[in-house]
Image (cartoon, helix red, strand yellow):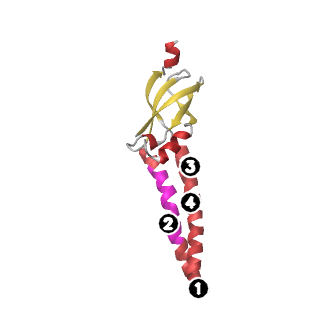
Amino acid sequence: MMEEVARVVASDNQGWLTVEVELKSTCKSCSSSESCGTSAIAQAFSSKTQQFSIQSERRCEAGELLKLGLPESVILKAAALIYLMPLLGVFIGAALGQYLGQLFEFNSNLGAMGFAVLGALLAWTLGKQQAKRLEEDAQPVILAYLGMSLNLRELAQ
């Protein structure tokens, strides 16, 4: 189960919470991040957040922190769709282009290359749509209610 901390932005009376999760870059976690150019670029861009709604069995206030969990299988399936589908499209497209080139007596190598690119693009589009549908159907679950976050600036005043 992949876990992430989310902040409650809003709540309604039916038990739905709008939560915000900060999307983190992994560039800050390795030992080479001090001297790495990629890490410097990643730190230059501000952190991004994603908001979504989740069902809760108890009422929460805005600013409260929650620990959310999402099964790893959902992320692995989505990654497989996005990365493996284009590869499959390349092979099928190349085989189809080779066959059509021989059938209609034109350069089968050019046909294979052209159909490989078309197959990869088509498979990537289909894989991306399927992965998006899979991730939309996957609902994170609340693993723990962590309470209110502390703002050290407010405490210091």
- Name the residue tied to disc 1: 103
Q: Which mark is residue 124?
A: 4
Q: Helix, strand, or loop for circle 2?
A: helix
> Can residue 51 be seen at all in this image of the molecule?
yes
Does the magenta portion include 63? Answer: no
Q: Nearer the viewer, residue 144 or 39?
A: 39
In three-dimensional space, the C-alpha distance between marks 2 and 4, rounded to whole angstroms, equals: 9 Å
Asked whether the residues under the numbered discs 1 and 4 touch, taking CB atoms below 8 Å apart as contact, a structural biologist would say no
Q: Which of pointers 1 and 3 lies earlier in the amino acid sequence?
A: 1
Q: Which residue is located at x 52 percent, y 34 percent?
A: 21
Q: Residue at the top extreme? A: 157
In three-dimensional space, the C-alpha distance between marks 4 and 3, rounded to whole angstroms, equals: 14 Å
Q: Which residues are magenta?
A: 76-92
- Name the residue tied to disc 3: 133
Q: Position of residue 13 (x, y in %)?
A: 59, 22
Q: Which residue is located at x 55 percent, y 40 percent?
A: 44
Q: Which mark is residue 144?
A: none
In three-dimensional space, the C-alpha distance between marks 2 and 1, rounded to whole angstroms, equals: 22 Å
Q: Residues within 10 Å of mark 1 (few under 14, many from 20)?
A: few
Q: Helix, strand, or loop for circle 1?
A: helix
Q: Position of residue 121 (x, y in %)?
A: 59, 63
Q: Check the image and report above or below for 31 versus 95.
A: above
- Name the residue tied to disc 2: 88
In three-dimensional space, the C-alpha distance between marks 1 and 3, rounded to whole angstroms, equals: 38 Å
Give the residue type at disc 4.
Trp
Asked whether the residues under the numbered discs 2 and 4 touch, taking CB atoms below 8 Å apart as contact, a structural biologist would say no
Q: Which of pointers 2 and 4 lies earlier in the amino acid sequence?
A: 2
Q: Which residue is located at x 55 percent, y 44 percent?
A: 136
Q: Which of pointers 4 and 3 lies earlier in the amino acid sequence?
A: 4
Q: Which of pointers 3 and 2 lies earlier in the amino acid sequence?
A: 2
